[in-house]
């Protein structure tokens, strides 16, 4: 197997900001100058050769990583240097085996991707279909969105065929390690990882964790997780709270998303008991589908004496209902105890201008700018202090809201698509487009 191409230099999440400067001569050599990347001819940028890419992913109505994929495909479809087709799932998980309820989100609509051929040719139950997909991949680069160990047989088959056909495989590793560890997951994960030529992760912390799995010489690129847009109906805070049974003048802590052991719900409940003693108007809103038995959490709520201050909505929240939960919140808590990924919940909260309090695990800390909003995993007293600080100090809350919007502004999908296209170009061995030059090429293409 040929030696891997060197990775583009690792960049922090805020390196995609407009004022970001080259970090070193190596950075300039890896990306090329703006004029080289754009292929200047007689002072005018020439269109680069298009890189053909086949993406393996989930799309609505399937759950999976569909919100992320939808945004990324939409942004890549607008680029003149990428020719994209997508292979998605028409049946992603067995309904009875999926702990998150229905594996489809009926409210999630698939937008029209101009110029992108979308094929729903994958089903968990059809191995022959996996082979057909592998042999039908048209792109010179195959971009696999990898997140679910239950889908390992599909990915091993499709990507195995892609490698036999000498395709270059780029893999976005959404979860560097399993949220709930098991030997079979580790074995399948390593087997799938071996099929990639280079990797994309969403944070520096994730890159370090992945490097420990695949080796120091592996080609790993950090491309941040973009903000997830939420359908807006213009609901106001009072109306949102009234619909959830929360007083209009309450101070609301939101915990949103699937309820799983690594999410630290027990730690949050212990912390909120302290918050409730300090702030009599504080309420905790927990919304999401339990993947585990809820009864131990319910018993803890009773034991802590906070039953009257905790509102739960224990179901998968359809896309068209998400808005009211974030509008109702004064702060979003991400109390994860272990996490080798980046959070879709956090990137969904940012555009609302909602303050985030997070734990120092995975890529969570890269979503906040206030160091006091980052606490050690599993530390209920520290979490309580951080939440009370936001709820009790309007100046702090307002600054953290500004911070959330500022971070969201650095995570736009046009920039992320430019960075992703640069990874494709490097994988395919064609002149690259530096991520910060994406806007220049797009402007030229529109003229």
Image (cartoon, rainbow, N blue to C red):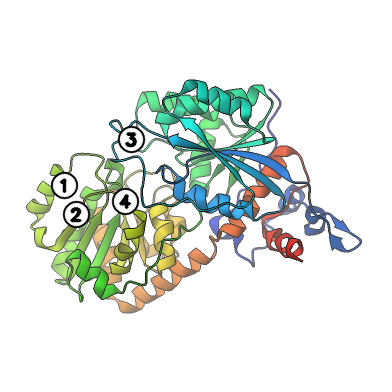
Cα distance, mark 1 to mark 4?
15 Å
Residue nearer the viewer, 187 or 113? 113
Disc number for residue 325: none
Cα distance, mark 2 to mark 3?
21 Å
Residue nearer the viewer, 56 or 348? 56
**Residue 224 visible, this orientation:** no
Residue that carries the numbered disc 1 in the rendered image: 297
| Outermost right residue | 42
Mark nearer the viewer, 4 or 2: 4
Callout 4 secondary element: loop
The answer to whether residue 399 is above or below residue 204 is below
Residue that carries the numbered disc 3 in the rendered image: 180
Cα distance, mark 2 to mark 1?
8 Å
Q: Earlier in the sequence, mark 1 or mark 4?
A: 4
Residue nearer the viewer, 3 or 443? 443
Determine whether, in the image, residue 9 is placed left or right of residue 328: right
Callout 2 secondary element: helix
Residue drawn at (24%, 67%) of the image: 252
**Residue 386 visible, this orientation:** yes
Mark nearer the viewer, 4 or 3: 4
Report x, y in % for residue 151: 44, 30
Disc number for residue 257: 4
| Residue 326 placement: quadrant | bottom left
Q: Earlier in the sequence, mark 4 or mark 3?
A: 3
Residue that carries the numbered disc 2 in the rendered image: 269
Cα distance, mark 3 to mark 1?
18 Å
Mark nearer the viewer, 1 or 4: 4
Q: Earlier in the sequence, mark 3 or mark 1?
A: 3
Contact between labelled residues 1 and 2, with CB atoms less than 8 Å apart: yes
User: Quadrant location of the C terminus?
Assistant: bottom right
């Amino acid at each position: 197997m040929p030696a891997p191409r060197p990775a583009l230099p690792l960049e922090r999440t805020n390196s995609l900001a407009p004022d970001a400067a080259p970090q070193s001569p190596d950075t300039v050599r890896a990306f090329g100058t703006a004029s080289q990347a754009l292929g200047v001819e007689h002072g005018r940028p020439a269109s680069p050769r298009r890189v053909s890419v086949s993406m393996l992913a989930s799309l609505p109505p399937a759950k999976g990583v569909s919100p992320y994929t939808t945004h990324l495909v939409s942004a890549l479809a607008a680029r003149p240097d990428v020719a994209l087709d997508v292979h998605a799932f028409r049946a992603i998980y067995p309904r009875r085996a999926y702990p998150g309820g229905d594996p489809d989100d009926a409210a999630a609509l698939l937008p029209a991707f101009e110029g992108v051929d979308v094929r729903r040719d994958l089903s968990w139950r059809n191995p022959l279909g996996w082979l057909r997909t592998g042999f039908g991949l048209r792109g010179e680069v195959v971009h696999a969105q990898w997140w679910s160990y239950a889908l390992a047989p599909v990915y091993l088959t499709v990507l195995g065929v892609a490698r036999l056909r000498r395709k270059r495989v780029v893999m976005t590793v959404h979860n560097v390690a399993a949220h709930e560890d098991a030997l079979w997951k580790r074995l399948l994960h390593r087997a799938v990882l071996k099929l990639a030529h280079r990797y994309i992760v969403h944070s520096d912390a994730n890159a370090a964790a992945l490097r420990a799995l695949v080796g120091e010489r592996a080609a790993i690129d950090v491309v941040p997780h973009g903000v997830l847009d939420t359908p807006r109906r213009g609901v106001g805070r009072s109306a949102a709270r009234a619909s959830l049974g929360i007083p209009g003048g309450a101070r609301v802590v939101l915990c949103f998303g699937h309820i799983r052991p690594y999410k630290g719900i027990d730690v949050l409940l212990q912390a909120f008991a302290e918050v409730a003693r300090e702030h009599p108007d504080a309420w905790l809103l927990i919304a999401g589908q339990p993947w585990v038995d809820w009864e131990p959490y319910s018993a803890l709520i009773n034991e802590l004496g906070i039953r009257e201050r905790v509102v739960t909505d224990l179901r998968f929240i359809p896309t068209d209902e998400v808005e009211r939960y974030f509008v109702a919140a004064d702060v979003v808590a991400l109390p994860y105890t272990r996490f080798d990924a980046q959070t879709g919940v956090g990137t969904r909260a940012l555009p609302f201008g909602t303050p985030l309090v997070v734990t120092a695990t995975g890529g969570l800390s890269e979503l906040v700018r206030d160091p006091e909003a980052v606490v050690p995993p599993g530390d209920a007293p520290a979490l309580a202090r951080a939440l009370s600080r936001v709820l009790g100090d309007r100046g702090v809350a307002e600054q953290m809201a500004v911070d959330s919007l500022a971070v969201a502004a650095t995570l736009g999908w046009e920039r992320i698509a430019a960075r992703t296209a640069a990874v494709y170009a490097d994988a395919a061995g064609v002149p690259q487009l530096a991520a910060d030059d994406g806007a220049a090429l797009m402007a030229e293409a529109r003229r």
